[in-house]
Image (cartoon, rainbow, N blue to C red):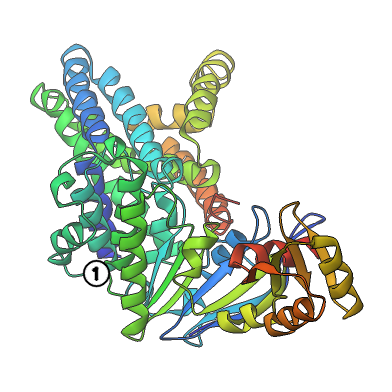
Amino acid sequence: MIALVRSEVYRLATIRSSWVSMALFAALGMLFGLLSADMWALLAGVGAFGLAVMAVCQHHQHGTAVLLHLARPRRTLVLAGQLVTVVLVTTAFAAVSGLLVLMGGEATQYGNTLLVVPVMAVFGAANAAVLRRSTYLFIGYSAWFVFIEGLLGKLAAPLPFSAYLLASAGESDSMLILVGWSLLALVAAGIAIHRDVAGD
Amino acid sequence: MIEILELTKVYRRFRAVDGVSFSAAPGRVTGFLGLNGSGKTTTLRMLLGLTRPTSGTALIGGKRFRELRHPARQVGAVLEQGLSHPGQTGRAHLRTQALLTGAEPGRVDMLLEQVGLGHAAGQRTGDYSLGMRQRLAVATALLGDPAVLVLDEPANGLDPEGIAWLRELLRAHAYAGGTVLISSHLLAELAQLIDDVVIVSHGTIRYSAPLPELYGSATRKLRVRGRDPQRLWRAFEQAGARVGTDGRVLEVVGLTAEDAGEIAFEARVPVYELTTDAPSLEQIFLDLVAGS
């Protein structure tokens, strides 16, 4: 497991597009943090979801999932390793990007967001393990967020992104809702990970 | 030792692989031949645990792939082309794999040199040519210093020098006691490399034996050119041979060269050319596949 996590972190650190995305999101997060803690929290959540999706889907997009499974045939362990990796990376990303929020005296929201970001990363990675295509996920969830959670749910319905926003503001019930969605996605991922790897 | 036992894969109603059984022994290079869509890749993917078989088993050293304790140190595989992130350098790709498999980090630069990519180690793999990506795939397979190598069309994209390099590498691996299972459509190249041959067509095994046995089982043809082809034709047919022509020479099946020479002598027809046409692996393969 440790070897898998080290390998994944090294991979993300040595792919230019990955670290450029992370640096860009971190810089953007700092900028948002200057404007409003809520905006930073939203960006941290979206960033965590996006990075987690990217980390998992890249393997399928470029075929390196084959190498991953050749080296580690126990796929549940591979999924667990990927989850640990995205939790570590996204938490670090959120912690750095929110430094201005912390220094601005919003320690509670900073802390709440750091607690909920890893859950959002798990939700993203689990979804990515099911669908394996980042484009589908980004387009699908963008539409979902705007139309279902935004227009219909008014960002207050017990749905994943609304729950994230409310949890980052300190609502413990919303945290439980997001954990529930993440567990549901994890169950699906635990089943989907055993599918044939692309190439057939 | 690789053992494939009654392996079957069914996609809805399509049987991609149907009861395939064969083995690949240590110290030998086994060629796995088949047309596109014949089930080669699916068989290799089932062997490596990437595709779940509908039924049957594939064993490496007596164990299924997912039961191997350190799979990357026991089995190296070259499957699809360009299995690396295009934004990562060749060296970073191998280091990632070394971290993942627990391979010696020191092998990374040694392997990059061995596969001829030392000069391009810091270059992004997205900028590699097809041949360079294949070399990187071979380096990835060798990272754990495995005894068993499974290669699916490894010569794709390699130039003649690269193909010769790969041939030497695989021969040396088998000579050192390793097991090599290789699929390829470059039959002329494969004929110079393999010890055993397995031919698959429409998902079923058509032939499995040592290569010399395959050559021995194939029908040999004589090519005969003489002053009077019609008289020769009649004489050979009267001796029980099957005779055809490509317009220039007679093609005779069912006689030895000695018999043909004696028959021509008795028929008083001067012979200008008499050769035994040894069938190539390609001809034998196509005959076997056409018969399925």
At mark 1, the secondary structure is: loop
- Taking the spot 43% from the left edge, 39% from the top edge, the residue there is A124
Q: Splitting the image into 4 quarters, where does residue A58 fall?
A: top left
Q: Splitting the image into 4 quarters, where does residue B8 fall?
A: bottom right
Kind of residue at badge 1: Gly
- Taking the spot 25% from the left edge, 50% from the top edge, the residue there is B93
Q: Along the horizontal axis of the image, is A173 left or right of B162?
A: right
Residues B135 and A83: in front is B135
Residues B165 and A93: in front is B165
- Taking the spot 67% from the left edge, 53% from the top edge, the residue there is B37
Residues A102 and A191: in front is A191
Q: Mark 1 points at which residue?
A: B102
* Residue B133 visible in the shown view: yes
Question: Percent position (x, y) of residue B173?
Answer: 33, 77
The 10 Å Cα crowd at callout 1, few under 14, some 14 to 19, many 20 or more, is some
Residues B182 and B16: in front is B182
* Residue B5 visible in the shown view: no
